[in-house]
Image: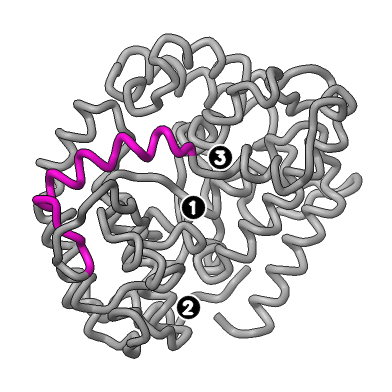
Amino acid sequence: MKPEQGIRFLRQFQELLAEGGFVATYKFALLQALADLSVEHDGAFDGSLSLHVEQIAEKFIEYYWNQARPFQDHVLRQNTRGQAEVLRRIEEYRPLVDGRLGRLRADQAAWSTLLRRIATIIVKMPLWKLQTVGNRKNEFLYREDEYRDRSIRLLPGVPDAFRAFHPMLTSMIRGGWISQIHRISANQEVLGAEAELEGFLFGTDRRSLERFTAVLRDHQAGECFYCGKRVSGAGDLDHFIPWSRYPLDLGHNFVHAHKGCNNAKRDHLAAVSHLERWRVQNLDEGHRLAKAFDDAGLSNDLERSLLIARWAYEQGFASGARLWVQDGEFEDCDYRWQAALGAPGGLRLAALENPPEYQ
């Protein structure tokens, strides 16, 4: 992407967040969904990306699922005019599955019903209001008149912009989301410090992660993923693609490791040798892992995990990232990551070097 194209996109995005007239938090969720889906799906040859509203609805459910639980004995309001309908719908389902989103996904009838309901809300409310700034439309993300078969089309260059700036955009969206919740008067009596609220809204539910540990410890025969030595005690559950780069809990992205190895790796991408081992352990054997995750009611998606990993290493390659080998040792992120991950060769890298024009 040419620098001037990226700057124009960021300016329009910033204007949308600053002046978009947010009443509920839906617009933040929609922007985050478009950014995440741009990472998780390959676009068309012209650089556009078609998205069905139920794909967007699935992201809404993921974002709001934990936010529908009580914060200091109260479910936070996400609309200045009363509780957001998405929250009310999700609140109906959480008790039925003991708060486990993976268990709800396994119930195809209930999951399909909730998806359709949330999709209807999205079409009714934020989809047509997102790109309104003041009293005018700025359709720089998608054209409303191209809406067909319950799908929108992100314009050529937009998915690449979302991919390139994803961590920055996520930070901007979350900052706006938190500010919106603070502005809702019904929340102000129960809210604590902003950092506490951010952790509640977007952090990891540690109890959910603990259930992954047993599955992965067994899958790895009790050995640390990174150093191969036996793990005594609980060990750590590590996001292989770091949470700071892509904040999503999916089973196949986790590995079990020594606390020391996990702390040393921190937010770095792992070295090519680790990447290849992760592919073999978590992707090549992914269907066996998926069954174990499903049996435990844990969220997982093999294809999405692969696409997120591919995106992360593409970005690392483009930015000249240093990959973590072991404590104090790093290597360059070079072309070898493609073979290690089994990623399609030059197609995506060619797109990085010669992206379509941002509209």
Q: Could you say which is closer to the camera, residue 167 or residue 10?
A: 167
Looking at marks 3 and 1 on the same chain, the residue that comes earlier in the sequence is marked by 3
Identified at 41% across, 78% down, the residue is 316
Residue extending farthest to the front is 233
Can you identify the residue that label 2 sits on? 355
Q: Mark 2 vs mark 1: which is more N-terminal? A: 1
Residue 343 appears in the figure = no
Residue 206, percent from left and from top: 45, 39
Is 10 located above or below residue 213 in the figure?
below
Q: Which residues are magenta?
A: 205-226
Which element is circle 1 on? Answer: loop
The relative height of residue 343 versus residue 188 in the rendered view (above or below) is below
Closer to the observer: label 2 or label 3? Answer: 2
Residue, disc 3: 147
Coordinates of residue 80 in the picture (x, y in percent): 84, 26
Q: Residues within 10 Å of mark 2 (few under 14, many from 20)?
A: some
Q: SS at mark 2?
A: loop
User: Which disc, if any, is residue 5?
Assistant: none
Residue closest to the eye, 3 or 139: 3
CA gap between label 2 and label 3 equals: 24 Å
Q: Are marks 3 and 1 in contact (CB under 8 Å)?
A: no
